[in-house]
Image: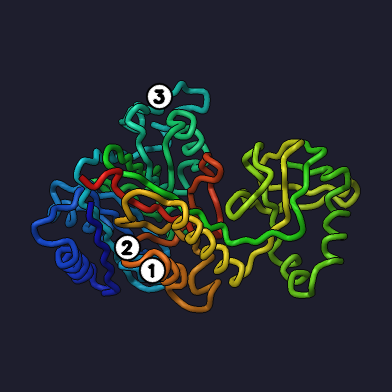
Amino acid sequence: MKWASSISVDSSLPEALEETTRQLKERLGDAVEPHIALVFVSPHHRARFSHIASGLQQQMPHTVIVGSSGAGVIGAGREVEASPALSITVGHLPGVKITARHISSHSLPSPDAPPDAWHEMAGVAPEDVPQFLMLIDPFSLSAAELIRGVDFAFPSSVTIGGLASGGFGPGANALFCNGHVFTEGAVGVAFSGNIILDTVVAQGCRPLGEPMRITRAEANFLLEIDGEPPLRVLEQLYENLPEQDRALMQRNLFMGLAMDPLEDDLRQGGFLIRNLLGADTERGALAIGSPIHEGQLVQFHVRDSQTSREDLSACLEGYMDQAGGPPAAGAVLFSCVGRGQGLYGRPNHDSDLFGRLMGDVPLGGFFCDGELGPVAGSTYLHTYTSSFAIFRPRTTS
């Protein structure tokens, strides 16, 4: 297995295509043919999106080509925001079966469809244990329905990806699939065979106080934690915090939901971070951006640039400590449009940190309007997250 990544900031699309493909040949080798190409392009090239798909398919006739538009583009470990950019990340994957499908809103199975309908949509069988990469247009297809159905039909599989960005309404984003350009739906890629898709999902938050148990809840309304109204608990927590954390609570307060009911010792990444949608001051209740249930552990969280930096570092270091077998060969980063320079005040923060900790692993990707990634074995749609797909072979023989 061998990966390579390239990027061009040339405002001329033909020049950008020439530059990126030349870089790939130099890094991958002229004699090595890529089996997969992941393409991400800024909206500055919107008028020529169709030329990207057809031009690359002509240059790589035997390569599965998928991608999307992105408000920011990542390639060769470099992040480019608010400027013309094209990135291509390719993989030479011997012994790997790659299946790519465009999924329209009309071809998405209904929520009560049997697993067979989802298997037919994906074009793969669950016994192959496919690993999925999904790119979704947020204006035309429900990401939540898609990932929920894929999790249901492929319980042993991993799904990661992101929502296309750069467009501000229906039809403004692009999805690429094997020489074609689509402005709606989703593009899904299934990998099976001699490949492992590891995931690192950094939600950019740190906890405040201690985990607490939900003692009363209705749907997504938190009515009691540890026998107390949530607003009262929140007030007591606020009084005992330093000034810096008090300021963060007022601007960037979230709720962490423990997703593993058997886990009491919650470490980095053990919580699903969700927004607080509002408060009922009469009942002292909070509305959470996800269904909750009695008995579930929860903990308040905050987010800022330093917290996000520390969280990403801890997540990547934790992955490196736990990963065994062959090393990583390539990676794709799905990062929220709310991260990058707007959060850190400088470019390339997450990519640089990945490179320092993971070494010389080719890294591509884009800035998304929502990121897909697993928490405690189930796939969720996140915000303000950096989700890494890390590829390595099962065996090196």
- Decide: is 319 above or below 94: below
Residue that numbered label 3 is attached to: 117
Residue at the (18%, 48%) spot, across then down = 63
Q: CA distance from mark 1 to mark 2?
A: 7 Å
Residue that numbered label 1 is attached to: 355
Q: Is residue 189 visible?
A: yes
Tell me where residue 309 appears, x and y as whole percent.
Answer: 55, 69
Q: Find residue 361 and name its label.
A: 2
Binning the other alpha carbons within 10 Å of mark 3 as few (below 14), some (14 to 19) or many (20 upward) gives some
Q: Residue 48's quadrant in the figure? A: bottom left
- Could you say whether the residue bearing mark 2 is in a helix, strand or loop? loop
Rendered image coloring scheme: rainbow
- Could you say whether the residue bearing mark 3 is in a helix, strand or loop? helix
- Could you say whether the residue bearing mark 1 is in a helix, strand or loop? helix
Q: Find residue 158 and name its label.
A: none
Q: Is residue 179 visible?
A: no
Give the mark, 3 or 2, whose residue is nearer the N terminus.
3
